[in-house]
Image (cartoon, rainbow, N blue to C red):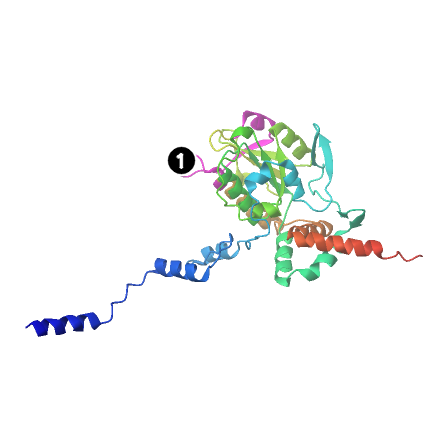
Amino acid sequence: MRTCRTLITTSLTSLPKPLKPFSPISKTLNLTRTHSVSFTPCIQHARPHSSTATQSAVSSEPPCDTSTPNDTVELLLTNRDDVLGLMKMERRITKTHNDIVLGSHWFPYFDRFKCGSVDLSSSEVLQAVGPYMMEERRERIRNTVQNRTYSLCLVVEGLTDFGNVSAVFRSADALGFQSVHVISCDSSKRYRQNRHVSMGAEKWLDIELWDSAKDCFQVLKSRGYRIATTHVGIDAVSIYDMDWSCPTAIVVGNENRGISDEALELSDLHCSIPMKGMVDSFNVSVAAGILMHHAVCDRTSSLGSHGDLTPEETRILLAEFSLRHSKSMISIAHDYAKRKAATPTPKL
C-alpha cells in the first residue's frame, strides 16, 4: 500500500503544471516591461464599425499634431500675445483703447510674410514650403481654405467652462468659420476646466480676445457685421427666418446667465433656436453648433457655397495655413528669404 502511494505521488508531481488563463492586461504589462514600450501623447482612436455618419465624423478629425504637445486652449487664451502669435502673415492692425486689434476689414492679412528685412508674398511662401509638404496635406489645406468664410463669425461671451470654449472652437473649424472672438466678463473664473476637446482646432482659427462686449461689438460693426445675440424673448427672431447671406456675428453667452445686458443692448437683433421639448435651452456649445450648422446650410442653399473668399484671399490664407502647419515651415520660408536677398536683382 505504501508503495502504491509513493507511485501515485511521483506520478502527480511529474505532470506538467496547468497554464494560467489568458489575461489581456497581464499580457500587456509583461510586454511593456520586457520591451520598454513608450507611448506618445498622441492618442489614435479606432474607427467604430457603426453608421456612415459616425464613421464620417471620425475620419474627418484632423491628424494629431505632436509638434506643440503642451499648447492648450486654456494657456492660449490667457495670453493675448500667444493668440496673435498664431498668425504668421502680416496682419491688418489698428489701435483701440490702447490695445492692438485687427483692422477694420474682416479679412485680417496683407499679402506679406516678414522675414527680417525681407518680405515674401503668399505666392513665394507657397513656392518655398510646398515641396516640403506631402501632397495629401496640401490637398487637405486647399479643401479647407476653399470652404472658409469671414462673412460670418462667432462670438462667445463670458464662458467659464473651458470645455465649452474648446468644443465651440472645434465646431467652428469643422463648419468653416475662420474668425472666432472670445469676450471675458470675469477673468478670475475663466476656463476653469481643461477637457482637451478642441482637437487642435485653435491652431487653424483666427482668434481675437476682448475684455468687454462694447469693445468687441464696436470693432465688429466697423467691419460690416450685424450683431445677432442668442436670447429667448418675445422680440427674438427664429434662426430659420434670418438671412444668413448678410454678414453676421453670432453671439452666445454664459452657461448660466446667458447673454449679458450690455451685449443685448448693443446688439442689432436677438435670435433663438425654436425648442420643441420641455426644456427651454441648449448647452452653450450645442447651441453654437446648431447655429453655425444652420447658417452653413442656409448659405449653401441660397449662395451655392459657404466658402466665399476671393482668389487673392484664398491664396493668402493658403500661405497662412502652410506656415501654421509646423515650425519647420517657418524655417524653410526664412531660408528662402535669405536666398532671395542674396540673389542680385537684374537691372532693366
Q: Can I make out residue 175 in this image?
A: no
Where does the C terminus fall, quadrant-wise? Answer: bottom right
Q: Few, some or many C-alpha atoms within 10 Å of disc 1 (few <14, some 14-19, many ≥20)?
A: few
Look at the image and give the residue range highlighted in magenta. 259-286
Q: Secondary structure at mark 1?
A: loop
Along the line of sight, which residue is nearer the eye, 258 or 3? 3
Q: Outermost residue toward the front?
A: 2
Residue 23: x percent and y percent?
Answer: 32, 60
Q: Residue at x 61, y 53 (%)?
A: 144
Q: Residue at x 54, y 53 (%)?
A: 64
Q: Can I make out residue 60 in this image?
A: yes
Residue 322 in magenta?
no
Vertical comparison of 100 with 46: above or below: above
Residue 135: x percent and y percent?
Answer: 64, 63
Residue 163: x percent and y percent?
Answer: 49, 40
Along the line of sight, which residue is nearer the eye, 176 or 189? 189
Residue 310: x percent and y percent?
Answer: 71, 50
Q: Residue at x 20, y 70 (%)?
A: 13
Residue under numbered circle 1: 279
